[in-house]
Image: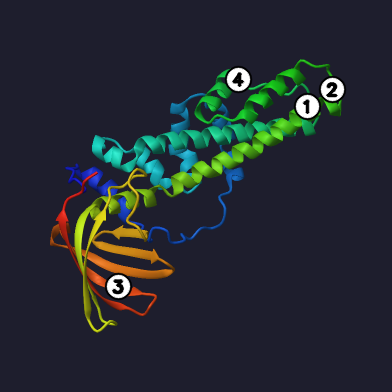
Amino acid sequence: MHPSIPLIASVIALVNFLLLADLSPIGAAEPMAGPVDFIPVMGKYGEQLDAVTGDGQAVGLFVAQIGPALGLNDVATTLTAKNIPQKVAKELGVQELTTSAQRLIAALAAWQLADRITQALSERTIPVIVPQAARTEWIQSSSPLASLTLTIKELAQLSEAKPDPTAADRTPLALSAGRLALDAQQRAIAEWWQLKTWKDRIRTVRGRSRLCGTWQWIIHNHQQHHQEQKLSLIFPPPGPDYPLVSGLAETIVLGENVYLRWEINGQVQEDSLQFTKEGKGLEGTFVNSQGGWGSISGKRTSDCKP
């Protein structure tokens, strides 16, 4: 079962705000204003991006400006919180959030570099300024991109070339810079999505932790002449090493409410339940695609076992 953790008041407020303020079901489509637009953010904080050469600076820039500007206020709030107990920090995935924030800033920095090289080439600004070694080394260590290595190599070669390189001389760098821009953009989108969906992943882990254990269920089907069926279900702990119960397609736990969706042999059943008896019981109803409906009564018979 999910362990109870003593928290100081500020941590309780933080966790409740982050995980309970937005109660949209996991897996449901979240309203979005459209694809995130990085370009205005990169333009506004371009000078700050230029100055980043380490993970600490990257997290600082994310927390203070870029994170909130990209709609990631909850992540920024978590990364600035103080005195979070170690168990809570692990539950919230603070280390993973920190790493993802660093990678996002590194991807934006690489993207910015690629755009500036492309602009310099289009304006025939020669030589193109080679970025600081410390900056490119940090980008590669935080968010490795093979196209960045190639771009830096082509940039150095062009900078050492004749004063007025031809279009053919500039083509290899233009191609590698274009590839770098695309790779960095894709990396930035992936990291942004990882951060944007963070709370849903935490809720999923919490829900599976609360359900984990062996349960005895009694299903009363009103469609089948009030037939009762008894069965034993084992819900595993959260994590990729513990697959879900066969047929269980979706699990949502919000507070005391539990939603389960089962898909077996083309048939669908949805269970709407509530925890009772301090988490040792479950009571609720079900409906299925065959027209069946009725009640479910569950009792936990053993605790969570990895």
Q: Position of residue 168 (x, y in %)?
A: 85, 27
Amino acid identity at mark 1 = Thr
Determine the residue positioned at 86% across, 25% down.
166
Asked whether the beta carbons under mark 1 and mark 4 sit within 8 Å of each other, the answer is no
Q: Distance between the Cα atoms at labels 2 and 4? A: 23 Å
Q: Is residue 303 left or right of residue 290?
A: left
Tell which tag, 1 or 2, sits nearer the viewer: 2
SS category of the residue bearing label 2:
loop
- Outermost residue to the left: 277
Q: Which residue is mark 4?
A: 132
Determine the residue positioned at 60% across, 44% down.
40
Q: Position of residue 139 (x, y in %)?
A: 55, 27
Q: Distance between the Cα atoms at labels 1 and 3? A: 68 Å
Q: Which residue is mark 2?
A: 165
Q: Distance between the Cα atoms at labels 1 and 4? A: 18 Å
Tell which tag, 3 or 4, sits nearer the viewer: 3
SS category of the residue bearing label 1:
loop
Q: Is residue 87 above or below residue 17?
A: above
Amino acid identity at mark 3 = Phe
Assess disc 1: are there few (<14), some (14-19) or many (≥20) residues with their C-alpha within 10 Å of its C-alpha.
few
Q: Which residue is mark 1?
A: 125
Along the polypeptide, which appears first: circle 1 or circle 3?
1
Q: Distance between the Cα atoms at labels 3 and 2? A: 73 Å
Asked whether the beta carbons under mark 1 and mark 2 sit within 8 Å of each other, the answer is no
Query: As rendered, which of 202 and 110 lies closer to the eye?
Result: 202
Q: Which residue is mark 3?
A: 286
Along the polypeptide, which appears first: circle 1 or circle 2?
1
Along the polypeptide, which appears first: circle 3 or circle 2?
2
Q: Is residue 273 left or right of residue 113?
A: left
